[in-house]
Image (cartoon, grey):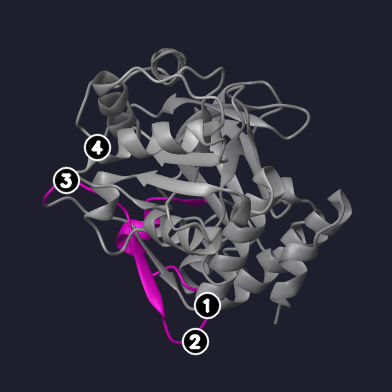
Amino acid sequence: MINTDSIFSIASEADFKALALDIFKFQFENNPVYRSFCDLLYIHPSDVKCIEAIPFLPIQFFKSHQILSSTDEIKTTFSSSGTTGSVTSKHHVTDVSIYEQSFRKGFNTFYGNVSDYVILALLPNYLERKDSSLIYMVNDLIKQSNHAESGFYLDTIQELKERLIQLDAEGKKVLLLGVSFALLDLVELHQFHLKNTIIMETGGMKGRRKELVREELHAILKSGFGVSKIHSEYGMTELLSQAYSLGNGRFNCPKWMRILTRDPEDALSLQKPTKTGGINVIDLANINSCAFIATQDLGRVYEDHSFEIIGRFDSSDIRGCNLMVL
């Protein structure tokens, strides 16, 4: 068994690589779906000496298979959003405390103590769902903040406007997390001039508005909120960790998470830094599901391990990865 405490006590590059290889071996032996995938690639742990040689499971498997590396009872299942009738991803979680450690320690890494902030959440499309990992995280951060003003806003955008103005004028540190279309709705309602507030967008339009490239979206939001930077969160149902951008468009990972890119035309070939490719994620907090995931996002990674997201694959398939019937 892997000691889960070791995930959050990584102190060096060597620690990360050693633990990633240990978790690969553990999941090869204990995750039937991942084992079948590796077998189809003719890859065995004895062949894998570096993290670049670890196979990355296509993210679509979370829609069609139960991805588990544990026989423990499933305590909760997070589901992705989807249009009516579409197949959604399901991330079965046997130990919710690992997720809580991950997002609490991850937030602290980049923003410090959550109790220093008033947390305001504008996540209407997520709040309507009870199985959202994002809502679980933000709800916990709101509780941890220990500020009476912290909370969710659904259809009370006018109230949020007034609360935001008041808190900022009082000089309180405020973090407003919002889905992109809702933040745009807010700045269309009012032109802000915020001095003590961080604006963090958590994702796209979800069919509510025309999709915008990041630069255009952030330019509108910076102007509307009167701030110099827009922060971003990168996470997904299939992960138990998040990366954050503090306003320069580049995301940084906590020590137990790493991004690599693969050749868009050859899913089994990794690329050197700065080349655009498919995003592969190593999330060691996924100890009980799968820590090695090939996503449908396109981006590039830099020498310092920061990364940016450029878009998504046009096709719903990840080319070269469809070795098993989904």
For label 1, the residue is 95
Choose the circle earlier in sequence order: 3 or 4.
3
Choose the circle earlier in sequence order: 2 or 4.
2
Label 1 to label 2: alpha-carbon separation = 8 Å
The correct choice, above or below, for 290 with respect to 232 in the image is: below
What range of the chain is rendered magenta?
A: 57-84
The secondary structure type at the circle numbered 2 is: loop
Q: Which mark is residue 56?
A: none
Q: Are marks 2 and 4 in contact (CB under 8 Å)?
A: no
Q: Which mark is residue 157?
A: 4
The correct choice, above or below, for 293 with respect to 260 in the image is: below
Which residue occupies 69% across, 74% down? 4
The secondary structure type at the circle numbered 1 is: loop
Select label 3 or label 4 by which is in front: 4
The secondary structure type at the circle numbered 3 is: loop
Label 3 to label 4: alpha-carbon separation = 24 Å
For label 2, the residue is 72
Label 4 to label 1: alpha-carbon separation = 35 Å
Number of on-image labels: 4
Q: Are marks 1 and 2 in contact (CB under 8 Å)?
A: yes
Q: Are marks 4 and 1 in contact (CB under 8 Å)?
A: no
The secondary structure type at the circle numbered 4 is: helix
Q: Amino acid at mark 2?
A: Asp
Q: Quadrant of residue 102?
A: bottom right
Q: Which mark is residue 83?
A: 3
Q: Are marks 1 and 3 in contact (CB under 8 Å)?
A: no
Q: Is residue 178 left or right of residue 254?
A: left
